[in-house]
Structures are given as structure tokens and as C-alpha cells.
Image (cartoon, rainbow, N blue to C red):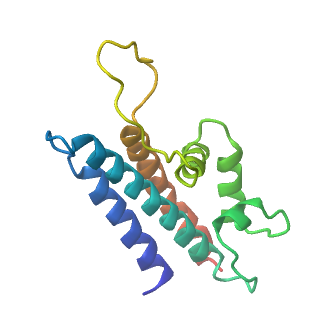
Amino acid sequence: MTPLARTNQLLYQTELLLAIEAGGDEHAMARRMALQEAALGQLELALDAVLREVTEHTDLPYEGWRAWLQATTVNVAELERLRALASAPGSWLSVLLKHLQALHGNDGAARRDVRTGLIASAGESSLGDTLRWCYCEFKALLPSLREGSSEW
């Protein structure tokens, strides 16, 4: 499978996971949380795949998405663009990275629903909605990342 095909596959799988309804039985909350964390994991794999894709023309060894986003000695335009997004507060990539950090932590990224009777923050999106937004923004950026990378 080509890097491009792998990125597409992972994004499609993310879309499928985000479209599954959790249901209404006693396992609905656990199912919702599992689906959200699975979609988040797929987005992480897609981020890794797109970084492989846009840096495949370099002769540098690939050390994973975290290393590529933190490396300051690798000057690839597409990578610089992703680094800028990662450091921009409120950008889809910055938000995604925050949730990925939580996913790898002891508490995970998904949360139980707020119990009825408690006041919830009106401005706070659900993890599912946030992941859908990150997915859409990621997918919208992908053609321009690929266009620059294909010039090499």
C-alpha cells in the first residue's frame, strides 16, 4: 500500500467510527467512549501516515509524528505548515494533539456524560463533535499538503 493510500484508508476508517451511533442500552456510554477513543487513535495513525507521505522525498530517517513535529532541523514546507498549526492555539491540530496526549494518559480522552441536574458548560463541545471537526479540517488540508509534496 502506498503512503497516500494508507492515509486515505485511515481517514476513511475514522469517518466510519465517527458515524457509528452508540445506541441506547446500558452499554451506550461505554460504547460511545470506546468509539471516540478508537476514532482518536485512527486520527493519530492518519497524522503519522500523512507525515510519512509528505516527507518520503527526504532521505531522513522517520522517527514518528511527535519527533517530526518537534524537530527544528528538518525543513520541509508541509512539515513547517503542520508545526505552525500544532503551535497555534485553537487550531484543529493543536486541539487534536491535546486529545492525543489525554488518550495516552491514565484517564484516557473520552469522558462520561454529565449527569442530569448538573450545570454543563455551554461552550464546550463533546469529544465526538471535536473529533469530527478535526477530521474535516485535516481532510480539507490534505490536498494542499499533497500538492506541495508531489512537486518534489
Quarter holding residue 94: top right
Image coords of residue 142 (percent x, y): 50, 61
Residue at the spot 67% in from the left edge and 83% down from the top edge: 57
Image coords of residue 68 (percent x, y): 71, 67
135 displayed left or right of 113: right
**The C terminus: image quadrant:** bottom right
Residue at the spot 41% in from the left edge and 17% down from the top edge: 120
Q: Nearer the viewer, residue 20 or 68?
A: 20
Image coords of residue 31 (percent x, y): 27, 49
Residue at the spot 55% in from the left edge and 52% down from the top edge: 100
Q: Is residue 11 above or below residue 136?
A: below
90 displayed left or right of 77: left
Residue at the spot 32% in from the left edge and 52% down from the top edge: 35
Q: Is residue 73 above or below residue 34?
A: below
12 displayed left or right of 45: left
116 displayed left or right of 110: left
**The N terminus: image quadrant:** bottom left
